[in-house]
C-alpha cells in the first residue's frame, strides 16, 4: 500500500516535529510519499527527504499555495490521490482545514485525531474529551486520516529520499487571500514545545499572567492557558490548551491556577511529567499530576522563578 502524507509547511519552512511524527504513524500503513506544497517549498522538501521512512518527496512550489488556502491544496491532493490507498497528515490547524475537503471531494469519510494504527483499515481515536477510545474500521477505498502527533514518536533523520518537482493543480477559485495577521514570539511553538507553562482562571487577570510568562521564559517554555483564562481575556486564543484548543504532550507541563476540568485534561494529559500549583487541594488537576504543590500561586510561582 502507498501513503501520501501532507507535510506541514509554513512560509517555506517545514515543521519537522509534526511531519516526522506523522511519518512515524504513516509508516505503519505502507510506503510513505511526502507532499510539500507552498509558494516556497524546495527547502522544506529537501528537509523532508531526510526523514527516515520516507520513500519519495513531491515538491509543489507555486504561488497558488502561498497563503495556506485550503481549497487549492485540497484540489492538488485529489489530483494526486489515484495512486494512494491512504492520504494522511498531522492533525494541525492547516490539515484539519484541508483534509475534510479532500475527503468530501473523494466522497469518503475523514478519520480525525487518530492515535493508534491497528491495521490498514482499523484505527483508534479519542472521543468524549479523551474519556473513551473509539475503534473505527473503514471500508472506504481510500482512507483520509489526521494523526494526533502527541501520541507518536518522531521518525529519525538520516534518510535520503528522492525529491520530485510537480506542477500545480487547477485552481478551483473558491477562495482568495486577503491578508495575514500573525503574532510573533521568541518562545517555542506551543504544540511542539518540550516544556509548557499554563495559567488558569486562578491567575486572576491579564496583568497577573506576567508571572506565568516569567516562569515560562526562565524555563525556555511555551505559554499555555485554560479555556477559562482565555474566555476571561487573560490570554490570547492561540494559547488555549484543551479539547477546544491545542493538544500538547511536552516532557514537562506546569499547570498554574488550573482546576483541571475534563476539557483541559483532554489537551494535556499525555504530558510526560505534570506539575500542578493550586491553592485548592481538592482541585481535580492533582489527580493527574505527578507533582502537586498546594500553595498560593502569587507567592509560589515568583519564588520558583527566582530560585530557577
Image (cartoon, rainbow, N blue to C red):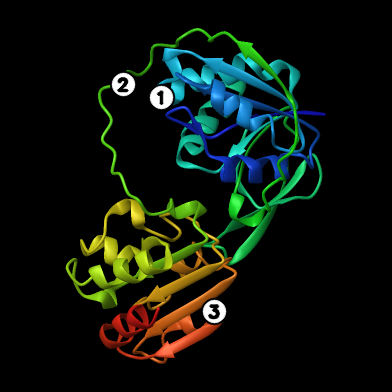
Does residue 110 show up?
no
Does residue 279 show up?
yes
| Residue 5, horizontal then vertical, whole percent | 65, 31
Q: CA distance from mark 2 to mark 1?
A: 7 Å
Q: Secondary structure at mark 1?
A: loop
Residue closest to the far front: 307
Q: Are marks 2 and 1 in contact (CB under 8 Å)?
A: yes
Residue 177 — which label?
2
CA neighbours of label 1 inside 10 A, class few (<14), some (14 to 19), many (20+): some
Residue corresponding to mark 1: 69
Q: CA distance from mark 3 to mark 1?
A: 39 Å
Q: Residue at x 50, y 7 (%)?
A: 170
Q: CA distance from mark 3 to mark 2?
A: 43 Å
| Residue 92, horizontal then vertical, whole percent | 50, 42
Residue corresponding to mark 3: 288
| Residue 3, horizontal then vertical, whole percent | 73, 30
Choose between 154 and 124: the one closer to the eye: 154
Q: Residue at x 62, y 12 (%)?
A: 165
Compare marks 2 and 1 and give the one earlier in the sequence.
1
Amino acid at each position: 500500500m502507498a501513503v501520501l502524507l501532507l507535510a506541514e509547511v509554513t512560509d517555506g519552512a517545514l515543521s519537522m516535529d509534526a511531519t516526522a511524527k506523522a511519518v512515524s504513524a504513516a509508516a505503519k500503513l505502507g510506503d510513505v510519499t511526502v507532499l510539500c506544497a507552498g509558494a516556497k517549498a524546495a527547502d522544506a522538501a529537501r528537509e523532508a527527504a531526510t526523514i527516515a521512512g520516507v520513500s519519495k518527496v513531491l515538491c509543489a512550489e507555486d504561488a497558488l499555495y502561498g497563503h495556506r488556502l485550503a481549497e487549492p491544496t485540497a484540489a492538488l491532493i485529489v489530483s494526486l490521490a489515484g495512486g494512494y490507498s491512504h492520504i494522511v497528515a498531522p492533525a494541525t490547524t492547516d490539515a484539519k482545514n484541508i483534509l475534510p475537503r479532500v475527503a468530501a471531494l473523494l466522497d469518503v469519510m475523514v478519520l480525525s485525531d487518530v492515535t493508534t494504527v491497528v491495521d490498514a483499515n482499523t484505527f483508534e481515536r479519542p472521543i468524549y474529551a479523551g474519556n473513551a477510545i473509539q475503534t473505527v474500521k473503514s471500508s472506504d477505498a481510500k482512507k483520509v486520516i489526521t494523526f494526533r502527533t502527541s501520541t507518536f514518536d518522531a521518525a529519525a533523520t538520516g534518510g535520503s529520499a528522492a525529491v520530485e518537482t510537480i506542477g500545480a493543480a487547477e485552481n478551483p477559485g473558491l477562495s482568495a487571500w486577503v491578508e495575514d495577521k500573525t503574532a510573533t514570539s521568541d518562545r517555542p511553538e506551543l504544540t511542539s514545545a518540550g516544556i509548557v507553562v499554563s495559567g488558569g482562571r486562578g491567575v486572576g487577570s491579564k496583568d497577573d499572567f506576567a508571572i506565568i510568562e516569567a516562569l515560562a521564559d526562565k524555563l525556555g517554555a511555551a505559554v499555555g492557558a485554560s479555556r477559562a483564562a482565555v474566555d476571561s481575556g487573560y490570554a490570547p486564543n492561540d494559547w488555549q490548551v484543551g479539547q477546544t484548543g491545542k493538544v500538547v504532550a511536552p516532557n514537562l507541563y506546569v499547570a498554574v491556577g488550573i482546576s483541571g476540568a475534563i476539557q483541559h485534561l483532554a489537551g494535556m494529559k499525555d504530558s510526560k511529567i505534570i506539575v500542578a500549583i493550586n491553592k485548592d487541594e481538592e482541585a481535580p488537576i492533582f489527580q493527574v499530576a505527578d507533582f502537586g504543590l498546594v500553595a498560593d500561586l502569587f507567592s509560589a510561582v515568583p519564588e520558583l522563578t527566582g530560585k530557577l
